[in-house]
């Protein structure tokens, strides 16, 4: 494009900081580690399928904690499972985020009175977002991931 004097003008220039670009890239490419422990895992798998399709949000499920930056805890966490869950969390990349999916992960759910069930995973692993329900629909997980992306972009 040229102006009235015949000199070439620059178009589509984007000026930003490295920090803003890093937050944008991190928010647009969340790689979750799937910790499907019980019935909520089926809904988490359904969210990755074609109807909800988390891939379109840049959300690619990883099987190794060293490649993931988001942990989705889907289901009932028992005392026997908690040390392995903490180890997986410690092995994740930094910055790391956690979504607790389902009433069992958030508050113990139906099994809160049991001696072997952890009633609140948030006491052991910092939770960023929760998805309530028993089991929650896959669309709610997609909404939670979009909220997580917004939190990352805003630096919260």
Image (cartoon, rainbow, N blue to C red):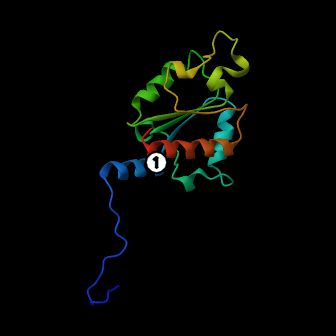
In the picture, the quarter occupied by the C terminus is: top left
From the top left corner, tell me how far across and down residue 17 is, in percent. 31, 53
Residue 154 seen anywhere in this rendered image of the structure? yes
- In this view, the residue in front, 67 or 153, is 153
Quadrant assignment, res 154 = top left
Q: How many marks?
A: 1
Q: Nearer the viewer, residue 7 or 75?
A: 7
Quadrant assignment, res 112? top right
Position of the N terminus, as image quadrant, is bottom left
Instruction: Identify the residue position indicated by label 1 in the image.
Output: 27
- The answer, for residue 29, to whether it is visible in the render is no
Q: Position of residue 126 (x, y in %)?
A: 49, 26
Q: Position of residue 94 (x, y in %)?
A: 37, 36
Taking depth in this image into account, of 8 and 86 the one nearest to the observer is 8
The residue tagged with tag 1: helix, strand or loop?
A: helix
**Residue 95 placed where, x, y %?**
39, 37
Residue at x-position 66% and y-position 42%: 140
Query: Which residue is located at x 66 percent, y 20 percent?
Result: 108
Q: Residue furthest top?
A: 115
12 sits left or right of 59 in the view: left
Determine whether, in the image, residue 29 is placed left or right of residue 78.
left
Q: Residue at x 52, y 49 (%)?
A: 59
* Residue shown at 31% from the left, 76% from the top: 10
At label 1, counting other C-alpha atoms closer than 10 Å, the crowd grade (few under 14, some 14-19, many 20 or more) is many
């Amino acid at each position: 494009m040229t102006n009235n004097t015949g000199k070439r003008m620059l178009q589509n220039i984007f000026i930003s900081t490295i920090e803003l670009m890093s937050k944008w890239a991190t928010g647009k490419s969340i790689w979750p580690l799937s910790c499907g422990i019980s019935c909520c895992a089926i809904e988490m798998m359904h969210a990755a399928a074609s109807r909800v399709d988390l891939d379109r949000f840049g959300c690619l499920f990883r099987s190794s904690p060293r490649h993931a930056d988001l942990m989705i805890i889907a289901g009932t966490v028992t005392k026997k499972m908690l040390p392995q869950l903490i180890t997986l969390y410690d092995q994740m990349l930094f910055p790391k985020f956690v979504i607790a999916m389902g009433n069992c992960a958030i508050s113990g759910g139906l099994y809160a009175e049991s001696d072997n069930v952890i009633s609140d995973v948030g006491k052991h692993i910092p939770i960023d977002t929760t998805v309530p329900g028993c089991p929650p629909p896959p669309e709610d997980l997609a909404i939670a991931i979009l909220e997580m992306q917004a939190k990352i972009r805003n630096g919260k």
